[in-house]
Image (spheres, rainbow, N blue to C red):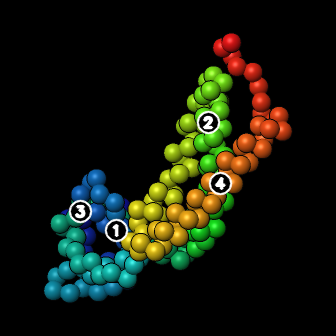
Amino acid sequence: MRVDPKAVDPNTLVGKWVSIRWHAEETPIKGKVCRLERGYCVLEDMNQHTVPFRAPSLHSIEITEDPSQERPTFMKKCWGWMNKNKLKTLFVSGVVIDFWANWYGYAIVHDWIALQAILGFFLPILNFPFIHWFIDETDIKERFKMTLVTAFSMVLGSTFMLLMIRAGVGVGTDFIP
């Protein structure tokens, strides 16, 4: 429920889950208002960081549900599992993505324009989670592990593509002779 930041009584926010923004274009900070301190509401965010704020200085404030009470969606469950099993996810998806990228190159060579367009559209989308993890990871050893896992998976992805072509699956003729 959206509330007017200028008219809200800070005492009514204590103990409630809120989503706050200082500017319209920023990502909201979500958490529980745990106490009032010297005229400031103190919010504890999802990472256990405290964020003091004064309601009138905010762009927007929204009272939300307790995150533990929210029903997790399929995407949240999937993303949670992927985050817990990063290396396994990187390996399996690395095989799929490399196979997909090789198929994209094969489609270009054979002038299969529609297939090439579809494959080219989805490649960056498939890579998004892994780019996100790689950039967020600060430990060089973890980044190197990610690199090794994806390198090995790319070996398999390329090999599967070549075996598929050798077996005659997906082999067509050029549209332009």
Q: What's under tag 1, amino acid-wise?
A: Ile
10 Å neighbourhood of mark 1: few (<14), some, or many (≥20)? some
Mark 2 lies on a secondary structure that is helix
User: N-terminal of the two: label 2 or label 3?
Assistant: 3
Element class at badge 3 = loop
Contact, mark 1 vs mark 3 (Cβ under 8 Å): no
- Dot label at residue 22: 3
In this orientation, does residue 114 appear? no
The crowding category of the residue bearing disc 4, from other C-alpha atoms within 10 Å (few below 14, some 14 to 19, many at least 20), is some
Residue type, mark 4 in image: Val
Residue bearing the label numbered 1: 29
Residue furthest out toward the right = 167
Q: Label 2 belongs to which residue?
A: 104
Quadrant holding the N terminus = bottom left
Q: Label 2 amino acid?
A: Tyr
Rendered view: 175 above or below 121: above
Location of residue 148 (image quadrant)? bottom right
Frontmost of labels 4 and 1 is 4
Left or right: 155 as drawn, with respect to 5: right
Viewer-proximal residue among 58 and 50: 50
In the rendering, at what x and y percent does residue 71 appear? Answer: 60, 69
**Mark 4–mark 1 CB contact (< 8 Å):** no
Q: Earlier in the sequence, mark 4 or mark 1?
A: 1
Q: Secondary structure at mark 1?
A: strand
How far apart are labels 2 and 4 at the CA level? Answer: 16 Å
Labels 2 and 3 touching (C-beta < 8 A): no
Mark 4 secondary-structure assignment: helix
Q: Badge 3 local density, few (<14 within 10 Å), some, or many (20+)?
A: some
